[in-house]
Image (spheres, grey):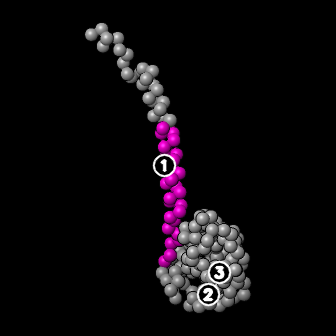
Amino acid sequence: MNDIAKKEPYVGSVRFFKHIILLLAGLAIIIPTVIAVTLALRSDGAAGPEIVNTIHGRGIIAAPGNIDEILATEKVGDGYYTSSMNNEWDFTRWNRASSNAFVENHAGNTKTVYFDVTLDATGELVYSSPFIPVGAALKGFALDAQIPAGNHSATVTYHLVDENYENITTASVAVLLRISR
């Protein structure tokens, strides 16, 4: 009975505090790791833009509050196009959503557009976008064709379309595709 009475209680003991410190250290490592893995998986599997309706087999990007306007027609003059995009697109893999590719149909433009991306070295079509109404933007998309890791010069060709979604004219811009792996 003497030995039992002399034993130090676990709660409040040095051994108890050592176990608490080990538990907190373990949580300090595990929680950030779980968060990092979750964010990495979520960003790699991005769903991409919301596509509503299709015309001529090509989707149309939904911009906030313009669902009814997507199908509306607007007759305006043709003759210019303001490109609003970044010119270096980073992809972890060709079939994963880009972390920074951004193309906007600038609000000052007058026509809906879509664009095609072709590799300069081979002329291969590697991406074809949905229709992008004036004021809408496309980001977080993956390429359509397998491209090996490395830097690839490419051309973005904008296709301006009329109210019937028929091509009117084109404009081209250079872009660099960086594929990590």
**37 relative to 139, above or below:** above
Query: As drawn, is 138 to the left or to the right of 109?
Result: left
| Quadrant containing the C terminus in the rendered view | bottom right
Q: Quadrant of residue 152?
A: bottom right
Give how far across and how far down residue 89 sits, in percent: 65, 68
**Which residue bears the numbered disc 2?**
161
Instruction: Name the N-terminal-most of marks 3 and 2.
Output: 3
Instruction: Name the N-terminal-most of marks 1 and 3.
Output: 1
Q: Quadrant of residue 175?
A: bottom right
SS at mark 1 in the image: helix
Q: Main secondary structure of the magenta part?
A: helix
Spatial CA span between label 3 and label 2: 19 Å
Is mark 3 in CB contact (under 8 Å) with mark 2? no
Give how far across and how far down residue 56 sits, in percent: 52, 88
SS at mark 2 in the image: strand
Is mark 1 in CB contact (under 8 Å) with mark 2? no
Residue drawn 58% across the image and 80% down it: 128
Give how far across and how far down residue 93 sits, in percent: 58, 67
Name, please, the residue furthest toward the left: 1
Instruction: Name the N-terminal-most of marks 1 and 2.
Output: 1
**45 relative to 3, above or below:** below
Query: As drawn, is 12 to the left or to the right of 28?
Result: left
Q: Which residues are magenta?
A: 26-52
Identify the disc placed on residue 34: 1
**Magenta segment includes 70:** no
| Label 2: few (<14), some (14–19) or many (≥20) C-alpha neighbours in 10 Å | many
| Label 3: few (<14), some (14–19) or many (≥20) C-alpha neighbours in 10 Å | many
| Quadrant containing the N terminus in the rendered view | top left
